[in-house]
Amino acid sequence: MTNLKCIRSALGFVLAFFASTAGFAYTSFEEVDVLSTEPIFQLVEQRVPSEQCQIEYVPAKQPRFDDKSQTPGIIGALVGGAIGNAVGSEKSNQRVGAVAGALLGASIAKDVNRKRHEGQYEGTEREVCRTVYRTERAQEIIGYDVSYSYNGSVYTSRMDYDPGNTIRLRVNVTPAQ
């Protein structure tokens, strides 16, 4: 009994196949004139990259011992103090000379150090660029509504492309049931 069901199912498939292909036996193609073509537009937004550049000041690196260092002042004070001490003849004159020499030596050392570093570590300017995005809106064609005449009737179809002056139709003729 199961074999009989399998045979019936197979026979049904074969009949359905032949019945469906019978409609394709009456297919033909015809070239007809296009009456009008209307483009279909859609508003599209796009992010467009552009480069934006500007000049920026870049500070230079400062030296390890810059003009804020106390070392030149201390060395100048020691040297000035030693000279002031050596110039004085009495003990009190030596002390005053040492203090005055130390102050003068520190001041001179700082001035010399400041002049030496002046303008040496200035910053520079450079161009810095970055990418920025702006939104642009545009009308884009996404298809065409094409009107054509066939057998005295006017039809309209939406197509992905502009067919030009004529369009090719597939005509299927099947009997009415």
Image: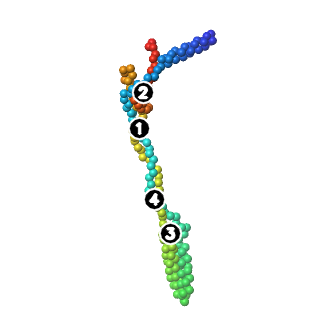
Indicate how the structure is coloured in the image. Answer: rainbow
**Residue 161: quarter of image:** top left
The answer to whether residue 87 is above or below residue 166 is below
> Which numbered disc, 1 or 3, marks the residue closer to the eye?
1
Q: Which quarter of the figure is the C terminus placed in?
A: top left
* Residue pointed to by mark 1: 140
In the image, which disc is placed on residue 167?
A: 2
Label 1 crowd bin: few (<14), some (14–19), many (20+), radius 10 Å: few
**Labels 3 and 4 touching (C-beta < 8 A):** no
Question: In x, y percent, where is residue 63?
Answer: 54, 67
Label 3 vs 4, first from the N-terminus? 4
**Residue found 52% across the figure and 75% down from its top:** 73
Task: Report whether 111 appears left or right of 7.
Answer: left
Q: Position of residue 130 (x, y in %)?
A: 47, 52
Q: Amino acid at mark 2?
A: Ile
Q: Tell me the residue that label 4 is attached to.
A: 56
The three-letter amino acid code for the residue at tag 1 is Glu
Residue drawn at 54 percent across, 74 percent down: 72
The amino acid at mark 3 is: Gln
Which of pointers 2 and 4 lies earlier in the amino acid sequence? 4
Instruction: State whether residue 9 is above or below residue 145.
Output: above
